[in-house]
Amino acid sequence: MRKKGHSKPNFEENLTPSQRQNRLVLTRTMVLLLLCGVLLFFPLVGYLFNLMVLDHDLLRQEAIANQTAKTQISASRGNIYDRNMNILASSYSVETVYLNPVAIANYNQDIDLIASGLSRILDVKEDFVRQQAENTKYYYRIVKKKISAELSQQVRDFINEHDIVGIHLEPAEQRYYPYTSLAAQVMGFVSEEDKGTEGLEFFYNKELTGTAGSIITTKGNNGTAMPYTYEKYYDAENGHDLILTLDTTVQFYLEKNMQNAMEKYSILNGAFGIVMDVNTAEILAMATLGSYDPNHWQDIYDVNLSNQLESMYQSAIAAGEGTTAYTQGLAKYNEAIKNARLKQWRNRVVSDGYEPGSTFKLITLAAALNEGVVSTNSHFNCDGAHDYEGREQTVHCWKAQGHGNQTTAEALGNSCNIAFSDIGVALGVRDYYNYAKAFGFLETTNIDLPGEGKGYFFPESMTVANLISGAWGQTFRITPLQLVRAVAALVNGGYLMEPYIVSEVVDEDGKVIMRNEPTVIRQVISEETSRTMRQMMEYVVTDGTAGKAKTAGYAIGGKTGTSEKIDVYDENGEQVKDKMVSFVGVAPIDDPKYVVLVVLDTPSDKTGLYISGGIMAAPTVRDVFADILPYLGVEPNYDEDDISAVNVSVPNTVGMSVEQAVKVLGERSLTLRTVGNGSVITGQIPAMGAEVPGNSEILVYMGEEVPKDPVTVPNFMGMTVAEARQAAKNAGIYIQAQGTDTAVGAIYVTYQSVAGGTSVQRGSTIHVEFTDNTVRD
Amino acid sequence: MERLPQKERTLHWDTHPHMDLPFLLLTLILTAVGLLMMFSASYARAFQEEGSSTFYLWRQGIFAIVGIGAMYLMCMVGYDWLRRFAYIFWGISIALLILVLLVGTKVNGARRWLNLGFTTFQPSEAAKAAEVVLFAAMIASFKDKMQTFRYGVLPFGLVMLGYAGLLLPQPHLSATIIIGGLGIAMMFQGGTKLRWFLLLILAGVAGFLVLTKTGYAARRLSAWLDPFSDPSDAGYQIVQSLYAIGSGGLFGLGFGKSRQKYLYLPEEHNDYIFPIVCEELGFVGAVLIILLFVLLIIRGYWIAMHAKDRFGALLAGGFTTLLALQVFLNIGVATNFLPATGISLPFFSYGGTALVLQLIEMGIILAVSCKNDNKLW
């Protein structure tokens, strides 16, 4: 220290100011060398390393995205076909109109002109177009999606006429359902954004959608070409097609007859039904009425609801923009319209549980027969009311005076609650639960449709009280589909199957991508029990509550059901007495092929008819069978009684002698009555080709002129069979009578297809429905 | 050494120049590489805007040859005469700055260019060079009076304020920053007492903060902090720059194969040429080029340290610092290490007069090296 301190001043003292300065400059330059020559560049190299090595992939990708132009090649959505390759859903090309606000601004386009022009052509608000056009933050602002070719042409003409830059059209696809509302809930629909929504469109969205392709090209900014270019093609892969097990014709018949029933019986809350193949569990038809048209899926189709919504909207609007009443009213309206849509889109067959009522007695009986606790020779006594241990309320049979002593078949045919309480008790809680589980009531059926529910069955810890009401199908909920597949198992030898609605997914070259096969889940009951069940079910139709299900030419088996809704309360907290009436039928019952379930939700009590499955649902299913069985190639086998219930086509007799005519008509179970005295037939009523019931009398005119004047349909309502026949004959028309072979009690006309007082052509045939009001359940 | 012999103070041809060979070589290499990269980077824009891909190459090439000639000339004539003309240069630079405010060409809202007919010229470039010569002369004369405020700070501060007063109205923030940074570095080199730098740094920070509050600079600043928040507008240039740099990876896309130069990256052959270099030559190439600059800068200071007199040392040191600052600021901006200002990259950026001036400055350093006595004082 001392030495240094001594020498330093000495050293400096010897220097001139200039030299001292030089020395300082030297050291300061060295510092600068380190600072500006070395230190400054460390962070730069660090930054470069970060960007070029660490962030390389990310930045390169973004740079490439920035430098390339991507042209989308849209993939076409697959078609949906029914089992006979009828197109149920398809797509066609449309165009979407959009604006490029940046280009509009850059090229100083006349926004007023654009707004007024597009507003006029596309029926959109002018202010909306203006807003979109002025949003210069974007290159892409949609004006209207999916417009028709005609409108596209108008837009093009408009662009060309005024030489406008910034209005563009791009290809898009519009989904189209040629059968409109047919099987609407099964089909679902496609949203504005081309996403499958609801139904098969949703469930198979991935398969139907396909993969959009693209062409990627390098480009310079402002579209200049780059010498080092590359192009990559990604082919668009069109969506796959679905081939359904659904049969459009069967679906049509199911919906038609359900619709008729809704009108005949003033059904207030819709209806649902299924047609299923009992041996494969293929769904041939599935309908929920109170439906909609998937081509216009946003519209509300329930007239009352639609009116209600419209008035809600109007009153909200009337309150005036900006008021709280306006905002609240609109919010309420939006909520209501959302619910209304969800309601009509809902596939009640798979999504909703309902109380099956007496149709479930089949399951109880099958379990008891299979367990051997009941046999075909068992006897049950019904006094109309009975008390059971473990249940507080007395069980009342629907027939207050009781059914007396019944065989097993009679108990089912009568749908006797007391007998079935006995059967349930004999079976026991455990077996009842186990069979219900084996029949699939505790699980979803795994059908290839979205939103499947599984109802609400008893827990394993169910009580005897549960058992007794459960034995006759009350106080729990299952889905219609669960019931149908269980009934299929009852009659097909005992095999519970997995239902399905898509048989194949095929690509555009027809190659099968996926195939659904019939799948047996388990055998629930023996072949023997199944055979017994078929006999029992046939008995219900021939001799029991389901007489109105008799279908001319076919052996039908089935079971009626009527249930009060549980858990449904009105605004006063009173339990609603609304009823659901149902019938599940199987045909032909001696060689089961198809099971049909129809459930009618809440028949009006104002029709004068007794509200029951036997009176309302059974004839509906009968009509369905009468339509679909011949179509599906099930040969009818008519007996004498059936003839008059079947329509035959009238042959030509003109030009024949009476003898010849008798022979020709006789071949078709028709008779004749002559009018006039000629030797050759000169005219006939009805004309050739007309459909008349079997056993009808044809009028042949022997030289006399055939009357051409119309006749008036009598009012048949309330008439007996004999009265109706006579009235028809007097009027010069034919009636096809249905429900006349119901076993018990007096029957009266409750429905006629053409109203009394209507003028019709002489010799027309009208349908007349007879009902025995004592048939219940 | 303190008083120069009379004959050495006159302008003369040095018939036996022993210029510093490494410095000369580095300068020539950088000029050549810079020219090539400028050609590659400008290729697309030259074609798009001038109709010929080699348009900028030819012009820049001619200036490079002229510049190299001027550099040799500077080396030959030595540097002593500059000291006598220091105040005249300063006066000329001030006059040019006033002239540009009056008759300068306005580009993108800034009046920075004088149109000379055959080329354009930025007086701010002349101002930087004049500042180096002036400050070197002042420091060399002030000797150890540099330690005082009166000599070591005040005159320098006034000169810099004067420059700033003429540059900011253009406006030309980047030149102001360089004039300021360069002046401070030269004062430091010249021996101004360290305590004054604290004040200067405080003043600098304060000035910076004031600037960031003004709309124009504030917008740039937010684009600097998060360029991707507004990639299509304020952040556009820096985002495109980062795309180019990031695309390079370790070894780059290859010479001439930049994609960002296809009119994505604005100023790709000017202030933003370095990103194209990165994109084409990769991290390895970019670091090699930085290394060339670093070697040149170190050699420049080395020459300064071996200068035969204080004026030479300050001259070489000043021009080296100017080079270092330009390189640092340019690459710093391109990599978003620093907020965006328009500073060109020496030897690389397109600009004929700037290149010629750059080479003349290198020639002055070489002239200093000719007189090096190869021993530290």
Image (cartoon, coloured by chain):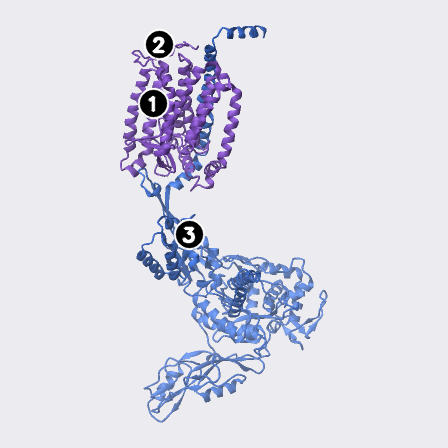
Chain colours: A blue, B purple
Q: Is residue A91 visible?
A: no
Q: Amino acid at mark 3?
A: Glu
Q: Which mark is residue A134?
A: 3
Q: Secondary structure at mark 2?
A: helix
Q: Which mark is residue A222?
A: none
Q: Which residue is mark 2?
A: B6
Q: Amino acid at mark 1?
A: Leu
Q: Is residue A727 visible?
A: yes
**x, y percentage for residue B364?**
35, 18
Q: Secondary structure at mark 3?
A: helix
Q: Residue furthest bottom?
A: A677
**x, y percentage for residue B81?**
35, 16
Q: Which residue is mark 1?
A: B359
Q: Quadrant of the N terminus of chain A?
A: top right
Letter of the chain that mark 1 sits on in the rendering: B
Question: Mark 1 and mark 2: span between their CA atoms?
Answer: 28 Å
